[in-house]
Amino acid sequence: MRLSVLIRGNNYIEKDRFGLPMDARKNIDSIIENIVAPVRESNPDAKIYLATYDSPALAELQDKLGPCELIKLDAQGSSQIETYKEGLKHVFAQDEYDALAVIRFDLQFRKKITDWNVDISRDSIYFPFKEYKSYWRDHWRVGDAVHVIGKSAISHFYNAMIMNQLSGRAHLHLMYYFLRTMHANLRFIEDGYFDSNTLFANPECDNPLYKIFNRPRLTTPSPSMGMQLGEIQAE
C-alpha cells in the first residue's frame, strides 16, 4: 500500500487560541521520525505535501523534510477546512499513492505510523479516535487532527467537508456524522474515547496517538467538562 503524506495548516504562529506560540521547527523531528521516514522507508518514491502558509519557519522546515511539494496558500482569510480542501484538490489528481495520511505541524507523535492499528485500503477512511463520552454518543464527534484516507474515498471526504461548512462548523469534528451518510468504510486508529485537545488534566486528554507539542499539560481540568454541546444530535 503506497502512502503519501499531507502536512497541513499553520507551521508558525505567534499565538494559538490558547495564547501560546507555535513554531513547527521545534517539532519537525517528531514528524520526520514517526511519519515521514517510515513512509519513505516503505516507499522511497512517496510524496510529501505541505499545504501551509509562508512564515519565518517554512524554508527551514522544507530543508529538514527533504523533497516535498509545497502548496503555499494565503493565510489571510483562510481557514482550517479551506486549507485542507486545497491540499486534497492538489493531491487528488496524482497517481503515485493508494492512500493519503493527513497530519498537522503541531502534532508530536507517540508512535511510528507503521505501528498504528490500521489496515488501509483504497476506500477506507481512518479517524484518530472517537471523542469522549457524550461527544460521541450524542453528536458522533471524532478527533480531527489525523486522517488516513484511501484514494477512492477522497471525493467523499471532500464532499463531507463541504457539508460540514454548510452546517456552519469551522472545525472537522463532525466529519464522521456527515460521512456515515455516504461512505461505509469508516474506521478508527485508536480504540477508546479521547479529547482531541491534549492541554488539560482530564484523563481523556491523554490520547495514545499524539500530543500537541506547544501546549504544556495543565493541572486543571477542561472547562467544558459536563458541558452540553450545541451540535447536531445523533439519532
Image (cartoon, rainbow, N blue to C red):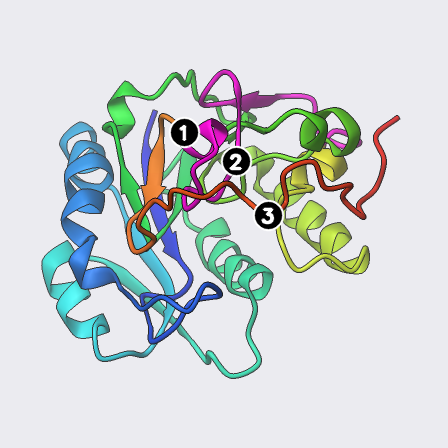
The amino acid type of the residue labelled 2 equals: Asp
Find disc 3 in the rendering and name its residue. Answer: 223
**Location of residue 102 in the rendering, given as x and y in whole percent from the top left corner:** 42, 44
In the displayed structure, 18 sits above or below 230; it is: below
Going 45% across and 63% down the picture, which residue do you hit? 18
Q: Is residue 26 visible?
A: yes
Instruction: Please give left or right for residue 161 compared with residue 84 in the image.
Output: right
Q: Can residue 67 be seen in this view?
A: no
Helix, strand or loop under label 3: loop
Find disc 2 in the rendering and name its residue. Answer: 195
Which residue ends up furthest to the right in the rendered image? 235
In the image, the segment drawn in magenta is 180-206
Q: Nearer the viewer, mark 2 or mark 3?
A: 3
In the displayed structure, 27 sits above or below 157; it is: below
Q: Is the magenta stretch mostly helix, strand or loop?
A: loop
The amino acid type of the residue labelled 1 equals: Asn
* Dots 1, 2 in contact, CB < 8 A: yes
* Dots 3, 1 in contact, CB < 8 A: no
Q: Does the magenta stretch include residue 84?
A: no
